[in-house]
Amino acid sequence: MGRPKVIANERRADAVPPAYVPSFELTKGQPPPVAANGGLSYMSFDKDGDAGTVAATVDAFALIATGEGQAVIDMIENAPPGPIETQWGLGFRTYDECLAYIRDTNMEAPEGGLALPLRYTVHEAPSYSIVSSNALWRDGARKADQMALRKEERDIGRRCLYFPQVLRDARRMQEYYPGLKPDSPECMDRLGVALAHCESKCENFYDSAEVERVFYPEIEKLLLDFFPGATDALVYNHDVFNKDYQGDRTEDQDNKNPGVNRGYANLVHNDLNDNSGRVRCRELLTRNLRNFGRTQHYTEAQADAKMSRRFMSINLAKPMETVGQYPFVLCAWPSFADQPYITNYRIYDDRVGETTRFTYRPDHEWYWFPQQQSTEVSMLKCYDSITDGSVSRWSFHTACVDPTAPEDAPCRKNVVVRSFVFF
């Protein structure tokens, strides 16, 4: 009898390629994340090329069914009037209540700084968001599921409180860290935040095609000039923020148009984490998935080689005019390096993204650029592949209301680009 035909490892030419599954990764000195499946990427649960989206959706509904999130909301809403005592300190239901506490206690800020409320989650548990492009929202047979998911999305914000914090003026960085200039790669390595300078030739930041044609290359050059040793930089998408914009805000991902955001993300968070920093990089290099920038042509083996060296994800925020209200604020890595992050899973049809949230600590080290100018670019690290603790892994950020700004101060109008930098 002849040998049986071995078919287990054979693959048809049109078969779905194997999923990229990042290994579990943890920064030296950092506790495990608050995450599903012990922190494993949902890519680990890929079935027939679904990137783990089915498993993540099942887990999303299972988490809602536990009622744990509702219990946190009930605790907040049923607490007596006044501040709420949390395990991390006093939290407040509203911005105004927290601001009154800051003023009553004469909370001080250094010169150029500001004491104000920042909004943190108080729910140390993973969360799930089914993004608007997911086919579930177009399934007429799933109305009940859709209602449950819409409620859950609203409820994420109901599990947050305002906490008093101090912002430092990032332009005065050398006062806090002698010899450390805010516009240096050393600042990014140490703190996960930095300042850059850009005089863009982009005339209309509401024209996505012009932004991609003019601004993306400008930022890629800025990154290569900023980081010694960098060999390549890829800007892959952007967002525009303007609360008062009167034109068309429509998002059109198929035509690489992010639209114009009316709101500002006023919840402490980071856009990536250990898993999603690598998954996002890989899918850009090998699949150009949601890549608004230069087309990439890497094979799996070439991507392996590129990602075996250091790479970082950097977000850069450039105002279109001087920022008067809703400033963009950043938290420095050393002040939360020993704190676990809390994973939020964003479920698409073809991937599960991971962002992170953090609970409040009074010693978080926050920075801002008062009256940030149109040529000043605030930079924040969202991911770094170095895990030995020698450099910052990421920062986190939020928007906030400046209580010292005039009532007619112009709200922030800016463009935020996302990038990877390779070494």
Image (cartoon, helix red, strand yellow):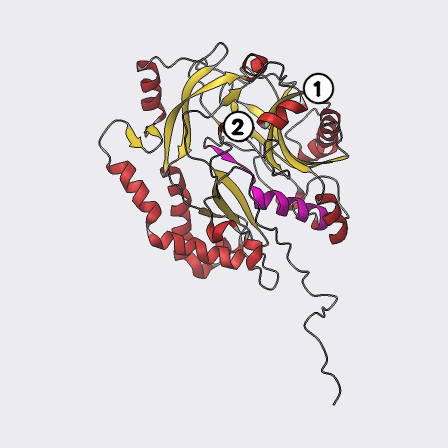
The quarter of the picture where residue 359 lies is top left
Q: Amino acid at mark 2?
A: Pro
Chain part drawn in magenta? 267-286
Residue toward you, 333 or 55? 333
Q: Main secondary structure of the magenta part?
A: helix
> Residue 312 — which label?
none
282 vs 165: above or below: below
Q: Amino acid at mark 1?
A: Glu
Residue lying farthest left? Answer: 80
Callout 1 crowding tier (Cα within 10 Å): few <14, some 14–19, many ≥20: few
Which residue matches tag 1? 199
- Residue at 48%, 53% in the rendered image: 37
Q: Is residue 351 magenta?
A: no
- Badge 1 element: loop
Q: Is residue 278 magenta?
A: yes
Please state, as top left, top right, bottom left or bottom right, where the N terminus lies in the image: bottom right
> Which percent across, then down, holds residue 99?
35, 20
> Which percent across, then down, holds residue 119?
41, 30
Which residue matches tag 2? 334
Residue toward you, 60 or 35? 35
- Badge 2 element: helix
Residue 236 visible (yes or no): no
Residue lying farthest top? Answer: 111
Residue toward you, 384 or 233? 384
Mark 1 to mark 2: distance in Å? 31 Å
The quarter of the picture where residue 2 lies is bottom right
- Residue at 38%, 40% in the rendered image: 123
Residue toward you, 302 or 47? 302
